[in-house]
Image (cartoon, rainbow, N blue to C red):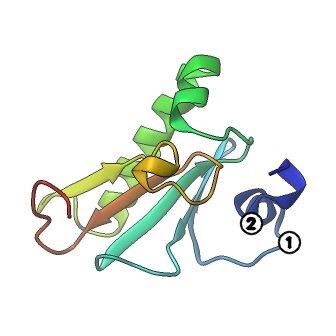
Amino acid sequence: MTEQDCLFCKIVSGEVPADVMRESDRTIAFRDINPQAPTHVLVIPREHHPTAAALASSDGDLLAELIREAHRVAVADGVDETGYRVVFNTGSGAGQTVFHVHAHVLGGRGLGWPPG
């Protein structure tokens, strides 16, 4: 997949609409179109990186910023006190379907372990 074909790059550019919750200079957070919990928000970098591993290798500061933004999403949605989960699916074997790194912020209901 090229960056021109990337769904999340199209969301960043405004070509594809999204329910945007937060934006910073380097990140954007929007609600998942197929939520798995009352709070299910994706936090992505504006810059294209295919996986969390690729981002960790190239820009650890941006990866840390994604985590900070994930916490801000949890606070804004009121799940920071009750608990929330931040998930990076890295690779197709882990369930990654869009190859633009993204953190899932999940909360608002009990989240069992191990995840099913």
Q: Nearer the viewer, residue 75 or 103?
A: 103
Tell whether 45 sits left or right of 104: right
User: Residue 22's spot in the image, x, y percent?
Assistant: 55, 61
Above or below residue 73? Residue 86 is: above
Circles 2, 1 touching at the beta carbon (< 8 Å): yes
Tell whether 29 sits left or right of 73: right
Question: Label 2 neighbourhood size at 10 Å, few (<14), some (14-19), many (20+)?
Answer: some
Q: Secondary structure at mark 1?
A: loop
Residue under numbered circle 1: 15
Residue under numbered circle 2: 11
Q: Secondary structure at mark 2?
A: helix
Above or below residue 96? Residue 62 is: above
Residue 78 picture quarter: bottom left
Which residue type does callout 1 highlight?
Answer: Glu
Residue situated furthest front in the rendering = 93
Q: Who's the residue at 51% across and 54% down the image?
A: 96
Above or below residue 85? Residue 56 is: above
Quarter of the figure that contains the C terminus: bottom left
Q: Who's the residue at 42% across and 46% down the image?
A: 88
Tell whether 61 sits left or right of 38: right
Residue 75 picture quarter: bottom left
Q: CA distance from mark 2 to mark 1?
A: 6 Å
Which residue type does callout 2 highlight?
Answer: Ile
Question: Label 1 neighbourhood size at 10 Å, few (<14), some (14-19), many (20+)?
Answer: few
Q: Who's the residue at 58% across and 18% down the image?
A: 57
Q: Who's the residue at 44% across and 48% down the image?
A: 93
User: Residue 107's spot in the image, x, y percent?
Assistant: 24, 67
Above or below residue 18? Residue 10 is: above
